[in-house]
Image (spheres, grey):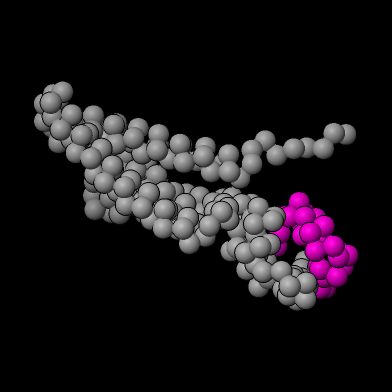
């Protein structure tokens, strides 16, 4: 099974968005953002699509599947 | 094919679990109050039941005030950010799985220990008290889990 990594922190910081702002906009907890950024939690497909739409990036720019 | 919609939002689920935990705890306490005199082999009376149940309710109300105060402090700290989302539901599933597995293993171990001690039979009232203890413990741990979110 491949390992999913993400570049959420880099993209979020590049766009100047704070975790609190992102949590409020996406209606999720800050702990979830921290867990996703640290790679401790893989978001559901629904949240992943929300993140892509919110950050306006390609899915491959945000998530990577390592073999 | 029409898209499948989630039947409950995390907030609705939170409310449902909160109400469920309260009903669970009150039902457990109520039944334990009824079973305690049976277990202690004492005569049952309405006054005794009310005294026991009232005491537990008063203790529960005191704990409730502390919990509400704690939540108020958290709300002040976190502002309008949600306190529950899909990850909380995921964690709850893991928590219940671990809690029920632990409970199952502990029950098996307890029965084996009793058997090794040479106990051949257990009174149903004792089993009833253990069961209510388990119900109350699970309800309290659920409440604790949600407080930690």
Residue for point 26% across, 35% down: B32
Q: For residue B31, what is the image quadrant?
A: top left
- Give the percent coordinates (x, y) of residue A33: 65, 65
Asked whether the viewer can see residue B121, the reply is: no
**Could you tell me which quadrant the N terminus of chain B lies in?**
top right
Q: Residue furthest top?
A: B46
Q: Is residue B121 above or below residue A4?
A: above
Is A58 part of what is drawn in magenta?
A: yes
Residue for point 58% across, 64% down: A31
Left/right of residue B111 with respect to residue B145 in the rendered view: left
Name the one closer to the observer, A25 or A37: A25
Residue for point 32% across, 39% down: B132
Residue for point 74% across, 37% down: B5
Q: For residue B30, what is the image quadrant?
A: top left
The region drawn magenta spans A42-67
Name the one closer to the observer, B53 or B108: B53
- Give the percent coordinates (x, y) of residue B105: 43, 53
User: Could you tell me how many numbered marks the image carries?
Assistant: 0
Name the one closer to the observer, B149 or B108: B149
Left/right of residue B28 with respect to residue A51 in the rendered view: left
- Give the percent coordinates (x, y) of residue B140: 37, 48
Q: For residue A36, what is the image quadrant?
A: bottom right
Q: Is residue B22 above or below residue A19?
A: above
Asked whether the viewer can see residue A15, the reply is: yes
Q: Is residue B140 above or below residue B29?
A: below
């Amino acid at each position: 099974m491949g390992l999913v990594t993400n570049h959420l922190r880099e993209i979020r910081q590049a766009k100047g968005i704070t975790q609190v702002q992102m949590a409020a906009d996406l209606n999720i907890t800050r702990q979830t953002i921290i867990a996703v950024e640290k790679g401790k939690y893989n978001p559901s497909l629904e949240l992943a699509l929300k993140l892509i739409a919110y950050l306006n990036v390609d899915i491959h720019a945000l998530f990577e599947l390592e073999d | 094919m029409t898209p499948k919609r989630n039947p409950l939002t995390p907030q609705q689920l939170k409310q449902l679990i909160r109400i469920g935990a309260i009903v669970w705890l009150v039902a457990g306490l109520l039944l334990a109050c009824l079973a305690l005199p049976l277990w202690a082999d004492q005569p049952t009376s309405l006054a005794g039941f009310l005294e026991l149940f009232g005491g537990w309710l008063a203790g529960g109300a005191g704990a409730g005030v502390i919990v509400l105060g704690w939540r108020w402090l958290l709300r002040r700290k976190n502002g309008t950010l949600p306190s529950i989302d899909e990850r909380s539901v995921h964690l709850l599933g893991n928590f219940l799985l671990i809690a029920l597995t632990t409970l199952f293993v502990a029950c098996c171990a307890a029965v084996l220990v009793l058997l090794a001690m040479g106990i051949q039979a257990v009174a149903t009232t004792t089993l009833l008290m253990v069961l209510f203890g388990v119900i109350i413990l699970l309800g309290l741990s659920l409440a604790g889990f949600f407080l930690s979110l």
